[in-house]
Amino acid sequence: MIRSVVRGFGAALPKRVMTNRELEDIVETSDEWIVQRTGIRQRYVAGEGETTASLGADAARAALENAGMSADSIDLIICATSTPDNTFPATAVDIQNRLGIHHGFAFDMQAVCSGFVYAMATADLYIRGGMAKRVLVIGAETFSRILDWKDRTTCVLFGDGAGALVLEAEEGSGTNADRGVLTAQLRSDGVHKEKLYVDGGPSTTGTVGHLRMEGREVFKHAVGMITDVIEAAFEAGGATADDIDWMVPHQANRRIIDASAKKLGIPIEKVIVTVDLHGNTSAASIPLALATAAGDGRIKKGDLVLLEAMGGGFTWGAVLVRW
């Protein structure tokens, strides 16, 4: 059985760090309130010349260097993003060009905060289907560009950044002892669209628009949806919560992360948390957290790692991968 094995990881962040204290000068809020309600202490904000494509390309270069691979060995690039540089072409094609790759194919994946999970699942299908042998899976966002900086309920939550993995085809035994992606479970339900969305777009307003969110509604649905899809991943992957070495959740809110881990019976010591450093970076949050934890040696070869996310739509999903 062909498995999609992680060969390398990388991350990229804008130069500017924005602390909660700085936000106190922009909107009526406080560092204490933000930390208590979300766990966020700072976030990175893209400056002039820093875009989703530039951050994505930097993360991809770091992942390739970590993997010891050249860019021209990549067959496919999937970029998960909700903040593309242009309406079209895909940001992935821009990244492909920045990396000097002129073969293979590239496209974007739009599932908001679940985007990286969706992109991992899609890359795995292309690899197992024989259409690609090496894939760059990127999550890259510049959410600061779609925030309403007068809306204190949303502007304190989000940040910018990018993360990337290199996946490569490898033959496995077909058991959950294999390295690589073991299972992916994806869900969506458009009935929840109005709870988390951007109030603009080419076909409606002709503008980019701003992010709008009903925070309490999102929180109310998040834990149940996340738990449901993780339990499905456990069943499909032949694993239990006790088997998990690390849970790497979407970094949206510390309270959601803690509540989900508790409901699943996963000790918080096994949960990778970077929301305090990066804020909610949407599709970039999981690969940024992976790069942080693999980079500092917590996530090691052979570890069973659970990825999970929920985003606007609603979309949600989980991936079980042996590192």
Image (cartoon, grey):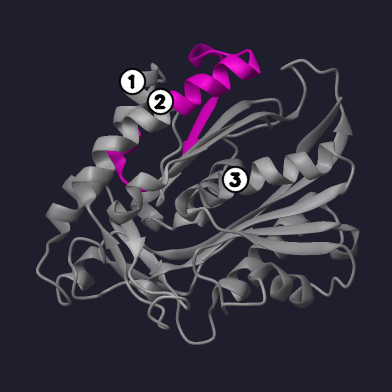
* Residue 241 versus residue 181 in the image, above or below: above
Q: Earlier in the sequence, mark 3 or mark 2?
A: 3
Amino acid bearing label 3: Tyr
Label 2 residue SS = helix
Could you tell me which residue is drawn at 80 percent across and 44 percent down? 126
Which residue matches tag 2?
Answer: 227
Could you tell me which residue is drawn at 87 percent across and 24 percent down? 1
Q: 38 left or right of 190? A: left
Residue 155 in view (yes/no)? yes
x and y percentages locating residue 285 in the rendered image: 48, 52
Q: Do the residues labelled 2 and 1 touch (CB within 8 Å)?
A: yes
Q: Earlier in the sequence, mark 2 or mark 1?
A: 2
Q: Are marks 3 and 1 in contact (CB under 8 Å)?
A: no
Q: How far apart are marks 2 and 1 (CA)?
A: 7 Å
Q: How far apart are marks 3 and 1 (CA)?
A: 23 Å
Which residue matches tag 1?
Answer: 263
Amino acid bearing label 1: Lys
